Image (tube, helix red, strand yellow):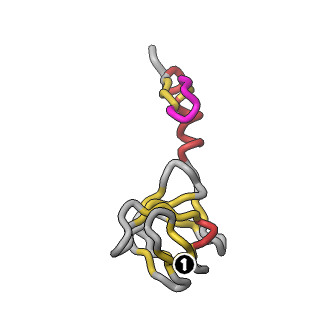
């Protein structure tokens, strides 16, 4: 007889097989902005300071609104798109939820 405790899931972060119950608790994570607000996929954020964008020779100004963010595997980074910059990754310490 197989119980829920016997199920194992491959954890890509560590490269190990871990009990499924342990992975469920690890999957619950909170990504927070500079003010401590919880961020979710699809949220809009505002930049809290001017940021120079590497490789784009452009500066995003404080107050710029970034829409439809996506959370990444790293709790300190979000993936987003801007009208002029594709594939933009921002640190959560520089954004505030709208």
Q: How many labels does the image show?
A: 1
**At numbered mark 1, what does the secondary structure look like: helix, strand or loop?**
strand
Task: Decide whether residue 14 is among the magenta residues.
Answer: yes
Residue lying at the far bottom of the rendered structure:
63
Query: Which of these two is toward me, 94 or 4?
Result: 94
Kindly identify the residue that appears in the image at 45 percent across and 81 percent down: 65
Residue range of the region highlighted in magenta in the rendering: 12-17
Q: Is residue 26 visible?
A: yes
Query: Which of these two is toward me, 49 or 42?
Result: 49
Where residue 17 sits: x, y (%)?
Answer: 53, 23
Q: In the image, is 92 to the left or to the right of 72? A: right
Vertically, is 62 above or below 3? below
Q: Pick the quarter of the image with the N terminus.
A: top left
Dot 1 corresponds to which residue?
47
Where residue 16 sits: x, y (%)?
Answer: 56, 24
Residue lying at the far top of the rendered structure:
1
Task: Decide whether residue 32 is among the magenta residues.
Answer: no
Vertically, is 44 above or below 29? below
Where residue 97 sits: x, y (%)?
Answer: 53, 76
Kindly identify the residue that appears in the image at 51 percent across and 64 percent down: 54
Where residue 90 sits: x, y (%)?
Answer: 52, 64
Query: Which of these two is toward me, 52 or 94?
Result: 52
């Amino acid at each position: 007889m197989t119980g829920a405790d016997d199920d194992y899931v491959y954890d890509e972060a560590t490269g190990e097989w871990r009990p499924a119950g342990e992975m469920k608790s690890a999957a619950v994570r909170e990504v927070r902005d500079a003010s401590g607000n919880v961020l979710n996929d699809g949220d809009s954020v505002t930049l809290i300071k001017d940021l120079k964008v590497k490789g784009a020779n452009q500066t995003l100004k404080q107050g710029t609104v970034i829409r439809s963010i996506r959370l990444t595997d790293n709790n300190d980074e979000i993936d987003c798109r801007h009208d002029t910059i594709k594939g933009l990754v921002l640190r959560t310490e520089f954004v505030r939820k709208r």
